[in-house]
Amino acid sequence: MFEQLYDSITKFDTVIIHRHASPDGDAIGSQTGLKYLIIDNFPEKKVFTVGDAAGRYSFIEGSGTDCVPDAVFDGALSVILDSAERGLVSDDRYLTAAYSVRVDHHIYCDTFTDSEIVDTSFESCAGMIAAFAMERGLVLSERSATALYTGMITDSGRFRYDSISPRTFELASFLMKAGINTEKLYRSLYCDTLENVKMRAFFAGKIRLFENSPVAYTYTTADELASTGRDAFSVSRGMVGIMSDIKGVDIWVNFTESEGRVLCELRSSQYNINPVAVKYGGGGHKKASGADVKNYDEAIMMLNDLKKLTEQGNE
């Protein structure tokens, strides 16, 4: 499955690894894990990572990115990870690279690299990189395994989502054998400040049910966002999970106003909400997708579409 990725890495002396902007644990984990996988198995190669800051995932060893001059892309290989659409890629200079390969587990939207490895049966992109290492018999260091394991557990919801499979645990076992310190990892990943706990309580108080349906949502205005002192992405992506375990709620959406638009994070425990996200110009997975709408009225339109989805029973 990963022959093209392996052949491309062996062919080029310089490899530049990209992932999507506003990175989550899977984007950072897969990028960092692949970086060390190449360094550990091909020490003669120059390996760079590009993108914005790792944010809350900066505890992952090597998660910092490089300042790469434009000239470095000339004659280099660009590897794009965890990006369903070209507009999501963290650095569009991959277009100037000699060759590009994409590895992704999202629902296919578009072909935008020279070689595409897209498999939606994987719970995470990090899982795909772990499978690549296993398939090719590559040396796997603790630092690479820890990064990949972090990506797997964050994108699978600690192995709770229905995207997991027996292969997920086989790959997790493969990574664990490299000597991952899970106590240290989980402490870094899940410990939180009192301020953040209070912030979640604030957003939990904003949860509403949409017209007595199994659809829950929060809507944060630009003024409310400014009052929190948080950036739009951390609120949009970071607070959607507070609705995930409410009894009787099958779909939940976090709406956050930002720079003249409304960021939408859609989640479901039962229904395929991806077509609704696509309708509004977004995408992602069947039960975890994102999109943008223009304003509050359009957000209500999206909620109506999601309500209809539950009435039709389209799981």
Image (tube, rainbow, N blue to C red):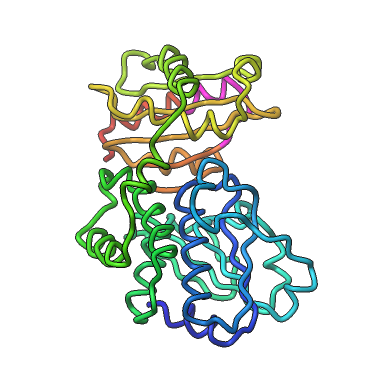
Q: Residue at x 55, y 19 (%)?
A: 220
Q: Is residue 295 magenta?
A: yes
Residue 114 image position (x, y, % from top left): 59, 75
Residue 254 drawn above or below residue 21: above
Number of numbered tags placed on the structure image? 0
In this picture, residue 51 sits left or right of residue 146: right
Camera-nearest residue between 277 and 133: 133
Camera-nearest residue between 154 and 284: 154
Looking at the rendering, in which quadrant would you find the N terminus?
A: bottom left
Q: Residue at x 28, y 32 (%)?
A: 312
Q: Is residue 40 magenta?
A: no
In this picture, residue 60 sits left or right of residue 297: left
Residue 147 image position (x, y, % from top left): 43, 58
Q: Residue at x 50, y 69 (%)?
A: 36
Camera-nearest residue between 196 and 80: 196
Q: Residue at x 63, y 21 (%)?
A: 229
Magenta span of residues:
292-302
Residue 207 drawn above or below residue 117: above
Prevalent SS, magenta region: helix
In this picture, residue 100 sits left or right of residue 108: right
In this picture, residue 19 sits left or right of residue 72: left
Residue 40 drawn above or below residue 209: below
Camera-nearest residue between 272 and 50: 50
